């Protein structure tokens, strides 16, 4: 029976688990080569099907370094290598997600599938964008977002008060105007030459949109670490500009020609790095 012919469960977590089982079953189970990791991390060796890797992690709850290394790779593949690795990541986290669902559904008066859906949605959002693999314990961060999403649904359900006629509700009902627009400051930073135009979209995506670094770095043709360093340098320049009043309407303390010179130096350095990278690629191909 193909995956498309399966009779899918109603529960989102049950459906995700069924997809994981189908993906990791014979004759060609989705696997990972554990030899790519440092042997000192403690993981077993060889090409191993994902359910066996998950079982190993469950048997070694204190293998923190191994878990971090493995999950950094799973998150990277989920972001870069197609939907099968998204399903794989959810399946690898299923024991924790089911445990959270059971805890949050205890005493819950609504549909348990709704909590399942919120946990899964929160986990997937974090997997796609919101967890920085450069930080410690990425797996814990993913699961924490899923837990909070389910917990928020329970909180909202407990605060809900049914009304027979909403037209008779007293008090203001006009939506509040949003306060603050950080993207406007970023756009002004570009206009002042504090932020290079090529960096505007990546900066907004990562710093304001909390998008994942890896796909954006791949689109720019640089490594994720290089993009992180670039964004940290931009953070420093923007913080300095805010302190000087350049982005808040206060008189500029730094001459425009100095800002232009700095922008030109950054552009020249970037071109030099690109030429060096191309030369390295040419050397490897010639060898």
Image: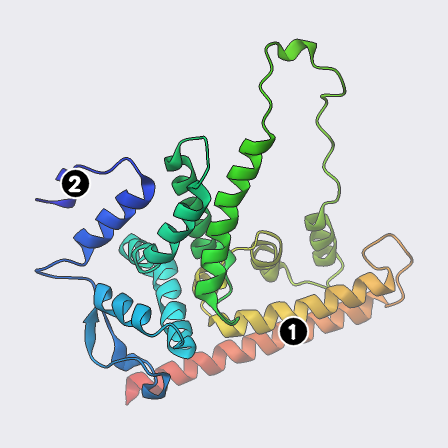
Q: Quadrant of the C terminus?
A: bottom left
Q: Is residue 220 visible?
A: no
Label tally:
2
Q: Position of residue 187 (x, y in %)?
A: 70, 52
Q: Are marks 2 and 1 in contact (CB under 8 Å)?
A: no
Answer few, some or many: residues within 10 Å of disc 2's Cα (few below 14, many 20 plus, some between 14 and 19). few
Answer few, some or many: residues within 10 Å of disc 1's Cα (few below 14, many 20 plus, some between 14 and 19). some
Whichever of callouts 2 and 1 sits on the residue coming sooner in the sequence is: 2
Vertical arrangement, residue 10 with respect to residue 46, above or below: above
Residue visible at 39% across and 42% down in the picture: 116
Tell whether 179 sits left or right of 5: right
Tell whether 202 sits left or right of 215: right
Q: Position of residue 65 (x, y in %)?
A: 42, 78
Q: Position of residue 29 (x, y in %)?
A: 15, 62
Q: Position of residue 147 (x, y in %)?
A: 48, 51
In front of the other: 239 or 194:
239
In front of the other: 152 or 248:
152
Q: Most extreme residue toward the front, as rendered?
A: 107
Residue at the disc numbered 1: 266
Residue visible at 35% across and 59% down in the picture: 78
Image quadrant assignment for residue 190: bottom right
Circle 1: element type: helix
Tell whether 110 sits left or right of 52: right
Image quadrant assignment for residue 282: bottom left
Q: Is residue 183 visible?
A: yes
The CA span between labels 2 and 1 is 51 Å
Residue at the disc numbered 2: 4
Circle 2: element type: helix
In front of the other: 245 or 176:
176
Residue visible at 73% across and 62% down in the picture: 193
Residue visible at 31% across and 60% down in the picture: 92
């Amino acid at each position: 029976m193909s995956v498309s012919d399966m009779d899918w469960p109603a529960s989102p977590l049950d459906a995700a688990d069924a997809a994981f089982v189908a993906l990791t079953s014979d004759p060609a189970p989705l696997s990972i080569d554990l030899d790519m990791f440092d042997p000192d991390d403690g993981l077993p060796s060889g090409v191993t099907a994902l359910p066996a890797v998950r079982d190993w992690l469950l048997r070694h709850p204190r293998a923190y370094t191994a878990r971090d290394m493995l999950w950094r790779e799973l998150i990277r593949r989920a972001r870069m290598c197609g939907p099968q690795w998204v399903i794989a990541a959810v399946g690898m986290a299923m024991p924790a997600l089911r445990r959270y669902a059971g805890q949050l559904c205890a005493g819950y008066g609504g549909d348990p599938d709704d909590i399942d859906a919120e946990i899964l949605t929160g986990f997937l959002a974090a997997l796609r964008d919101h967890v920085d693999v450069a930080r410690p314990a990425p797996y814990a961060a993913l699961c924490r977002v899923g837990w909070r999403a389910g917990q928020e649904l329970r909180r909202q359900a407990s605060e809900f008060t049914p009304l027979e006629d909403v037209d008779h509700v007293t008090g203001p009902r006009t939506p509040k105007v949003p306060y603050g627009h950080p993207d406007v400051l970023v756009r002004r930073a570009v206009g002042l030459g504090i932020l290079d135009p090529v960096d505007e979209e990546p900066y907004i995506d990562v710093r304001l949109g909390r998008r994942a670094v890896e796909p954006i770095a791949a689109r720019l043709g640089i490594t994720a670490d290089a993009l992180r360093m670039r964004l940290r340098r931009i953070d420093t320049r923007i913080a300095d500009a805010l302190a000087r009043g350049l982005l808040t309407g206060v008189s500029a303390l730094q001459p425009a020609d100095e800002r232009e010179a700095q922008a030109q130096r950054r552009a020249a350095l970037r071109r030099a790095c690109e030429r060096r990278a191309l030369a390295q690629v040419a050397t490897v191909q010639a060898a």
